Image (cartoon, rainbow, N blue to C red):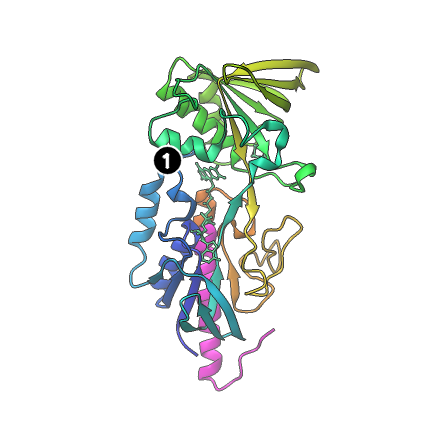
Amino acid sequence: MNNNVIVIGGGPAGLAAAGKLQDFGLDVVLVEKQPHIGGHLNKWYKVFPDFTDASEITANLTAGLGKTRILTNTNVTSIEGSAPNFLVTTSTGEKINASAILVSTGYKHFDATLKEEYGYGIYDNCITSVELDMMLKEKNVKTRDGKIPKKVAMIHCVGSRDEKVNNNYCSRVCCTNAIKVAIEVKEQNPDCQIFCLYMDIRVFGRGYEELYRTSQETHGIQFLRGRLSEASEKMDGSLLLRLEDTLTAKPMRLSVDLMVLMVGMEGNSELASVADLKLGCDRFYATAHQQYSNNHSHREGIFLGGAATGPKAIMESITDGRSAAAEIASFVAKNQRIINNGQVPSLV
Ligand SMILES: Cc1cc2nc3c(=O)[nH]c(=O)nc-3n(C[C@H](O)[C@H](O)[C@H](O)COP(=O)(O)OP(=O)(O)OC[C@H]3O[C@@H](n4cnc5c(N)ncnc54)[C@H](O)[C@@H]3O)c2cc1C
Ligand code: SF4
């Protein structure tokens, strides 16, 4: 048995896990399919709840990687053997022995074109929250024809809590993200009026509720409780939104220059067959037990961390990655003790 652990996915969860596994004295190989490590942090500007620059988080986690061997532009194509003697083959043809594997492959964004009634991909001034973060990073929040928007609507729950697209779960981060980006738009463009169209406001983390209050009291962001039924484009490129205000039970119309869809998180199941992993009904990876084995998969020696097992904020993903590292270190140590004592490792 060797001391190798393979971490698949170099987002905040995988980076945090790799750093801790190093500290535990294990040899870590980090496999990342993109050209750069950092995961979704590479797409974000400043992150909620405290507006930390996303690049600062990546730099902090990367500094802890020590001697971790990083393979970018690389996928895992097969996993043979069983715990604690896996043989992992990568897309470059390399074969690596590993005693344990961490799958921290994160999530995908909901494809906003599936909500046809909102007009994403059809109307120029309908964008996603991912695109808005890039505009904020470039300090260039403008309509498609280059004008500074006077009215902006943030549409909550796009692709989440929605039976029609088979995503019944709440993505957990988009309410606070909407509040964060609303404040940032207002800071970059103080004359802009901003409306958040929500079903319920779900701001559960430390500092999130305070951010929600600040957005209203300090920045004048307006919150309308109602679900958007349809958007249509006017001659000048602005958008007419039709919704029902569910507090007054009255239909409403709202004209805006820019509409931002707060897209939800979806499971990234691309390793399900390669690693023989089960999926939950939400199509994120299922854990061995939801209460007490949240970093274990159903397959011994293959662990799970971060948003691969469901929507999480950055801080939760980092903590979950480190928790997975602790489970792996204990698993490897236990197997080494068994081998040293001349016993055959149990696969139960
Ligand atoms: C619009 C939006 C805005 C957000 N803003 C915030 C915010 O302001 N604050 C906050 O706390 N949270 C925010 N989040 C949540 C945050 O993005 C996640 O918590 C975080 O990215 C999860 O980290 P992760 O490492 O689990 O996954 P990811 O960041 O998704 O990283 C996974 C990594 O695995 C790699 N990968 C995937 N598949 C493979 C494979 N088969 N082989 C090899 N590598 C693979 C990917 O390329 C990626 O690098 C936001 C989410 C959304 C949707
Ligand atoms: S966090 Fe808010 S916007 Fe996101 S799915 Fe949940 S309720 Fe909807």
When asked about the image quadrant of residue 119, the answer is top right
Between 232 and 110, the one lying in front of the other is 232
Look at the image and tell me in which quarter the C terminus lies. bottom right
Residue occupying image coordinates x 37% and y 65%: 28
Tell me the amino acid under the disc marked 1: Tyr
- Does 260 appear above or below 29? above
Circle 1 packing at 10 Å, graded few (<14), some (14-19), many (20+), is many
Residue occupying image coordinates x 64% and y 14%: 252
The secondary structure that most of the magenta stretch takes on is helix
83 horizontally vs 90: left or right:
right
Between 30 and 300, the one lying in front of the other is 30
User: What segment is highlighted magenta in the picture?
Assistant: 319-348
- Does 254 appear above or below 342? above
The answer to whether the beta carbon of the residue marked 1 is less than 8 Å from any atom of ligand 1 is no
Between 254 and 25, the one lying in front of the other is 254
The residue wearing badge 1 is 45
109 horizontally vs 21: left or right:
right
x, y percent for residue 130: 46, 35
Residue 159 visible at all: no
When asked about the image quadrant of residue 116, the answer is top right
Tell me if residue 80 is in the magenta stretch: no
Residue occupying image coordinates x 56% and y 69%: 300
- Does 58 appear above or below 117? below
When asked about the image quadrant of residue 40, the answer is top left
